[in-house]
Structure formats: C-alpha cells, structure tokens
Image: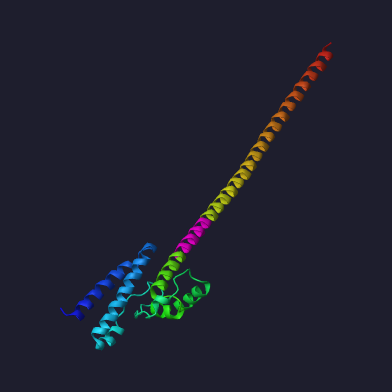
C-alpha cells in the first residue's frame, strides 16, 4: 500500500468516525473540532502527494455541520494564518456574521469561517454546535410550557363542564322537589276539605236529631 492509498484509507476512517460523532451532545464539541482539523490536514497532505487528485477531492464530501435543513457541502483547508484568529469570547458582531453566514453557506464551515473573518474553522464549528444545542434546549422548554398550558386549559374546561352539569342537576332536582311538594299540598288540601265536609255532615245530623226530639216533646 503506497502513501496515497494509506492516506485515503485513513481519511475514510476519520470521516466515518466523524459521522458517528455528529449526533452526540455538547460534551463532544472539542473532539469533533479536532477530527475536522485532522480531515483538513490529511486532505492537504493528499494534495501534496498527488496534484492530479485535486479534482476528485473537490467532489468528495467531507466533514460538515450536522443540520436538518441544509445539504452537506465539502469542507476545504484552513487559512494559513489561523494562529492569528481571535480566541476570546464571541462578540455580538461576530455572532451576527456567523448567523448570516449559516443562512448563506449552509453547512460549509470553511465558507462560514472565511465570512466571519475573526474565527477559524474549529472555533466556528464549536460555536455553531453550542448555539444549536442551546436552541434545541430552548425549543424543548417552550414545547414543555405549551403542553403544560394545554393540559391546564383542558383541566379548566373539564371542571367548568362538571360545574355546569352539577348546577343543571341541582336545578332540575329542585324543580322535581317543588312539584312533589305541590302534589303533597294538593292531597293535604283535598283531605282537609273532606274532613270539613264530614264535620258539616255530622253537625247536620245532630241538628236534625235535636229538631226531631223537640217535635216529639
């Protein structure tokens, strides 16, 4: 196996490892950046070993940012003056440039790094992964809050429905009770009338007896 084939094989293994690393969380950002640097270095070495390999290399997809809405584009070599790149905290102007570059160049880290101008490929990639992680966490929290709000609203509606049902039940129950009481009162009135009629009849009978007795005397 000559050096060119060896480098090709090594590049393939690193790319495979890089692809497996993509979906891991924020703790692997630094490791991911190192792998990208290795890919860039090996590609540069291959170009030195075989100049006619440049054309085929340009069509070979390499390490790229894992994004859901963009297509994978090839990553090219770093600028030679990368040691002069800013390594301090990101400024607002740099972050604004990074966001614009992502919209313009999709997943091409090299193009993004060139557009930002003050950060190398590895720094840009690490920051993008961090921002993606933060955005994902924010989306999760927002979804959780929305679910919580929806459940609260559902519970409230259920309680309102039960309250309306209970009130209707109480209302009709009271109506039934009133009707029942009215019926009882009617029966009682009827009974009282009958009792009065009986009393009157008794009084009449007594009066008749008295009159009859007087006549005899």
On screen, residue 199 versus residue 4, left or right, reads: right
Q: Nearer the viewer, residue 102 or 1?
A: 1
Question: Does residue 217 appear to the left or right of 180 in the view shown?
Answer: right
Does the magenta run of residues contain 144? yes
Residue appearing at x 36%, y 66% in the figure = 30
Q: For residue 14, say whether it is visible.
A: yes
Q: Nearer the viewer, residue 202 or 46?
A: 46
Q: Main secondary structure of the magenta part?
A: helix
Coordinates of residue 65 in the picture (x, y in percent): 38, 73
Which residue is at the front of the view, 9 or 203? 9
Can you name the residue that lies furthest to the left here?
Answer: 1
Front residue (pair 121, 154): 121
Is residue 182 positioned above or below 43 on the image? above
Q: How is the image coloured?
A: rainbow
Q: Which residues are magenta?
A: 136-150
Q: In screen coordinates, is 178 left or right of 27?
A: right
The C terminus: image quadrant = top right
The verdict on residue 72 being magenta is no
Instruction: Give residue 35's quadrant in the image.
Output: bottom left
From the image, which quarter does the N terminus lie in? bottom left
Residue 52 image point, x, y percent? 25, 89
Residue 212 in the figure: left or right of residue 31: right
**Direction top: furthest residue:** 217
């Amino acid at each position: 196996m000559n050096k060119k084939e060896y480098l090709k094989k090594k590049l393939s293994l690193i790319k495979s490892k890089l692809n497996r690393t993509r979906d891991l969380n924020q703790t692997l950002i630094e490791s991911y950046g190192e792998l990208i640097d290795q890919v860039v270095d090996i590609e540069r070495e291959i170009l030195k070993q075989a100049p006619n390999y440049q054309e085929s290399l340009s069509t070979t997809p390499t390490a790229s940012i894992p994004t859901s809405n963009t297509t994978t584009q090839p990553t090219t070599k770093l600028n030679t003056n990368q040691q002069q790149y800013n390594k301090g905290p990101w400024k607002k102007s740099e972050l604004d440039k990074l966001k614009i570059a992502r919209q313009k160049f999709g997943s091409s880290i090299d193009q993004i790094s060139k557009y930002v101008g003050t950060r190398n490929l590895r720094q840009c990639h690490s920051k993008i992964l961090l921002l993606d992680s933060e955005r994902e966490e924010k989306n999760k929290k927002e979804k959780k809050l929305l679910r919580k709000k929806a459940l609260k609203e559902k519970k409230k509606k259920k309680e309102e429905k039960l309250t309306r049902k209970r009130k209707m039940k109480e209302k009709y129950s009271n109506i039934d009770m009133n009707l029942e009481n009215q019926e009882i009162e009617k029966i009682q009135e009827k009974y009282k009338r009958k009792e009065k009629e009986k009393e009157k009849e008794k009084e009449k009978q007594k009066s008749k007896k008295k009159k009859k007795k007087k006549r005899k005397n």
